[in-house]
Image (cartoon, coloured by chain):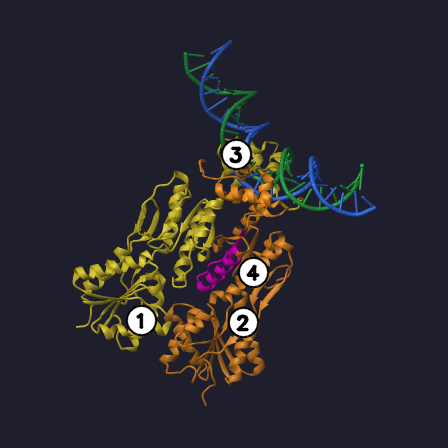
Chain colours: A orange, B yellow, C blue, D green
DNA sequence: GCACTGCGTCGAAGCGCTTCAACGCGGCGT
DNA sequence: ACGCCGCGTTGAAGCGCTTCGACGCAGTGC
């Protein structure tokens, strides 16, 4: 209180309680047994003086900063709310493990990762928006820093990853529509740039959808989808020019959902009577769209949570590289049914 | 390289270069003049050994962690993309000042702030989503930690704040529509919870709009707006039951934009021939909506940037509490024009 | 030729905490 | 009764860096 910075130190607590600094430290950490009388005396001193451990000193001495870095490249073509939801889940889970989250946005690219690793700012790092051949991977493989990817790169060996099983997801959507009797499908995909960048999940989903469609003898037209409302609507409207018998849509592109529904409405095609739509995306988008959409949920929270848990496990018990794929689950809502006729 | 942790220390650089540790430190910081011969020798040793300063040690010794905390309460009723845009601007600007961003999400509430302050994790803190009578304010006033609010609380004395001038914004929107000749307006506001929480910006905007409308003798009906697509559409549709002569809309609620346009379309009201719409929100939402909307931009990037700059200024030159209100500017697009008749 | 100044460098003292080795002590077994 | 063990506690040595005061050595003014 009297100090300039207002900072009570551990040494002051020790003096106040009449014990040594190390004893106070052990009371705090519980790493050594302390008699209950001493413990109580120390705890009361801590309360009286209003002591709070200094994170910087602790980090230096213990070589644990209790900080988790989260690398979140912020492409404008990635759907922000999902990124956010993952980030929040990461932050929340990290807190429950006594860690805080350092936010690294994309601007710096791999340099940010290098910096964090070299300066030992963080205890571990979680990477989002992983590309098939991500530039950050070599750095990770060279380094000791525990890392968890949210997303699956091309070759995930010696890496720890968490992701939705997008291949199963693509197949599942096609299955659902095919089972209902649809024979001609359209896959409304992410923005062109997402594919050009070889973002794993987007490619894996379409490819799996395509190969399942082939297996089932069902047609599937893939259309990436970008631009504003009008642009999207335009792209989608044209699908029927090309394949007039299309009756089923798989949509993996949140901003395209409403434009699609609006185009269908305008063309006088009823959902699900004339056309069925299956979305891949966050539950709330699907459930709150202008038509309640049958969808495969993107388990953003779970992915964030698992990523942190794997990172913490690596910190506690050493690295154990593994790839965790979350099984997709499809919820039937009001947008899918048998095709007309 | 041979070390377990792979960490080259400053001491090793000093040894390699044949100078003292302090000399290396001064080469790095530039806080003392160093002969160019020595500097070069040290710099080459740094390169050869691959030295990177340890952030933890640096933070402890210099009492600067180069970390900026960003408190971002993540209410689901706040529009995520704007929050994100601010966060990204904060992160980017912070980086350009040599700082990283620690992300504090809302879950912990004021406790997170207390924790960060007490542990001196961060050098400064930036708070988003400020309420009129925010619980975090007393903490800020008591503490030495530089803080910048993005948003304006009820009594901003002894605090540093950045915000769009929402009062001017509300007035500006009403002015625009009134000048075009509209006499009966509707204000489509944020979710009910936002007002209940007394989030400053929402209240200030409507109040200013109302009082300007009163001054001009124009009618203005305020409707908070929540729920899903259908719920919003429903709320909006009912505005015309109550005030059939409404011809102008001010919309301060991003998720309500498309439902509004869709309702108007369904009711056969053309924009801007029958009804004008002015939005308050991010530029891209306005420009990319299904009708290009006349709007007052929410300068998210600028707010984030300014907040960091003010925080850095406080770090460098001590606190200088001030409230910076950014003047609104209205861009006319395709959604506003004179009323019919 | 002398005190003075400023530049470049160094040594040492921290920053506030953790942790390791060590030590005294009372209770145990035999 | 003796040594042994484990518990509770301590002192000291760091963690890797910054920074202050000091010091030697030119160069300056007179």
Q: Tell me the magenta residue range.
A: A67-95
Tell me the distance, in whole angstroms, between the alpha carbons under discs 1 and 4: 39 Å
The disc, 4 or 2, on the residue closer to the chain's N-terminal end is 2
Tell me the crowding category of disc 2: few under 14, some 14 to 19, or many 20 or more residues within 10 angstroms, Cα based.
Answer: many
- Mark 2 = which residue? A205
Asked whether disc 1 touches disc 4, contact meaning CB atoms under 8 Å apart, the reply is no
Are discs 3 and 1 both within one chain?
Answer: yes
Q: Chain of mark 4?
A: A
- Mark 3 = which residue? B26
| Percent x, y of residue A54 | 52, 43
Q: Residue at x 44, y 78 (%)?
A: A239
Are discs 1 and 4 both within one chain?
Answer: no
* Tag nearer the camera, 2 or 1: 1
Q: Secondary structure at mark 4?
A: helix
Q: Secondary structure at mark 1?
A: helix
> In this rendering, is residue A62 above or below B238?
above
Tell me the distance, in whole angstroms, between the alpha carbons under discs 2 and 3: 54 Å
Q: Secondary structure at mark 2?
A: helix
Tell me the distance, in whole angstroms, between the alpha carbons under discs 2 and 1: 34 Å
Tell me the distance, in whole angstroms, between the alpha carbons under discs 4 and 2: 21 Å
- Mark 4 = which residue? A307
Q: Residue at x 42, y 81 (%)?
A: A271
- Mark 1 = which residue? B260
Q: Chain of mark 1?
A: B
């Amino acid at each position: 209180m009297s100090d300039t910075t207002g900072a009570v130190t551990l040494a002051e607590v020790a003096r106040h309680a009449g014990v040594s600094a190390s004893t106070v430290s052990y009371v705090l950490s519980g790493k050594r047994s302390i008699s209950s009388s001493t413990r109580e005396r120390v705890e009361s001193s801590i309360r009286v003086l209003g002591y709070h451990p200094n994170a910087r000193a602790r980090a230096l001495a213990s070589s644990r900063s209790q900080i988790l870095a989260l690398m979140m490249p912020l492409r404008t073509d990635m759907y922000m709310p999902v990124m956010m939801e993952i980030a929040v889940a990461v932050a929340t889970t990290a807190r429950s493990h006594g860690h805080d989250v350092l936010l690294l946005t994309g601007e710096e690219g791999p340099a940010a990762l290098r910096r964090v690793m070299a300066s030992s700012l963080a205890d571990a790092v979680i990477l989002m928006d992983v590309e098939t051949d991500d530039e950050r991977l070599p750095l990770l493989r060279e380094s000791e820093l525990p890392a968890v990817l949210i997303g699956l790169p091309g070759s995930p060996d010696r890496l720890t990853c968490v992701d939705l099983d997008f291949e199963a997801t693509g197949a599942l959507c096609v299955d659902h529509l095919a089972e209902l009797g649809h024979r001609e499908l359209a896959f409304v995909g992410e923005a062109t740039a997402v594919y050009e960048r070889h973002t794993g999940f987007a490619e894996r989903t379409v490819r799996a959808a395509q190969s399942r469609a082939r297996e089932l003898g069902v047609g599937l037209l893939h259309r990436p989808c970008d631009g504003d409302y009008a642009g999207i609507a335009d792209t989608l409207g044209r699908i029927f020019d090309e394949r007039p018998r299309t009756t089923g849509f798989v949509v993996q592109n949140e901003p395209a959902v409403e434009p699609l529904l609006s185009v269908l409405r305008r063309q006088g095609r009823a959902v699900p009577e004339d056309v069925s739509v299956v979305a891949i995306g966050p539950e709330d988008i699907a459930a709150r769209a202008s038509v309640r959409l049958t969808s495969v949920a993107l388990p953003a929270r779970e992915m964030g949570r698992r990523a942190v848990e794997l990172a913490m496990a690596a910190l506690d018990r050493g690295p154990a590289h593994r790839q965790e794929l979350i099984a997709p689950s499809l919820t039937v809502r009001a947008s899918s049914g048998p095709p007309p006729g």
